[in-house]
Image: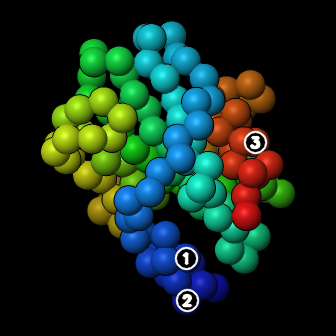
Amino acid sequence: MKKILFSILILFSINGFAFNWVKLEKNLMGGTIYVDLDNIDEFYNVIHFPVLFDYAGVLPSEIEKYLANCEEKILLKLSNTSYSEPMGKGTILEEDFSHKKKFGYIYPKTGSIHDVLMKFACNNAK
């Protein structure tokens, strides 16, 4: 099991440069949340997907990467990368990875943003 999880982490930690950000919803601060439709992948019944939080110039943008177990309804945040410009562009300001800083498992409440993200990813996995 550890080998499979390690393989998943290595496979999905490679950054691609092609993004197809699909607007998912606007948050209360005026920022917009996107999911990269072209990079939602399924591997051994686990979904990997990136999420972009664009804060409309108030804060830097962030790209977070998640693993989701759709059957168990559990998310694991793998990484969080902050950028100096909107839409995940500009210079990287900060990077956090789960092996350095434990984000922990997320058990999304119905209707929460994590619930919306997980349902979208599970419904659009390839």
Q: Position of residue 47 (x, y in %)?
A: 67, 61
The three-letter amino acid code for the residue at tag 1 is Ile
The residue mark sitting in front, 3 or 2, is 3
Q: What residue is shown with label 2?
A: 3
- Describe residue 95's horizontal placement relative to residue 28 as left or right: left
Q: Quadrant of residue 2?
A: bottom right
Q: Quadrant of residue 86?
A: top left
Q: CA distance from mark 2 to mark 1?
A: 9 Å
Q: CA distance from mark 1 to mark 3?
A: 20 Å
Assign the C terminus to one quadrant of the image: bottom right
Which SS class for mark 2?
helix
Give whichever of discs 3 and 2 has the lower sequence position.
Answer: 2
Identify the residue at horizontal 31%, vertical 47% (top origin). 81
Give whichever of discs 2 and 1 has the lower sequence position.
Answer: 2
Give whichever of discs 1 and 3 has the lower sequence position.
Answer: 1
Q: What residue is shown with label 1?
A: 8
Q: What residue is shown with label 3?
A: 119
Which SS class for mark 1?
helix
Identify the residue at horizontal 59%, vertical 55% (top origin). 38
- Against 119, residue 29 (above or below) is above
Q: Position of residue 111 (x, y in %)?
A: 74, 25
The residue mark sitting in front, 2 or 1, is 1
- Describe residue 77's horizontal placement relative to residue 94 as left or right: right
- Against 90, residue 13 (above or below) is below
Q: Is residue 67 visible?
A: no
The three-letter amino acid code for the residue at tag 3 is Lys
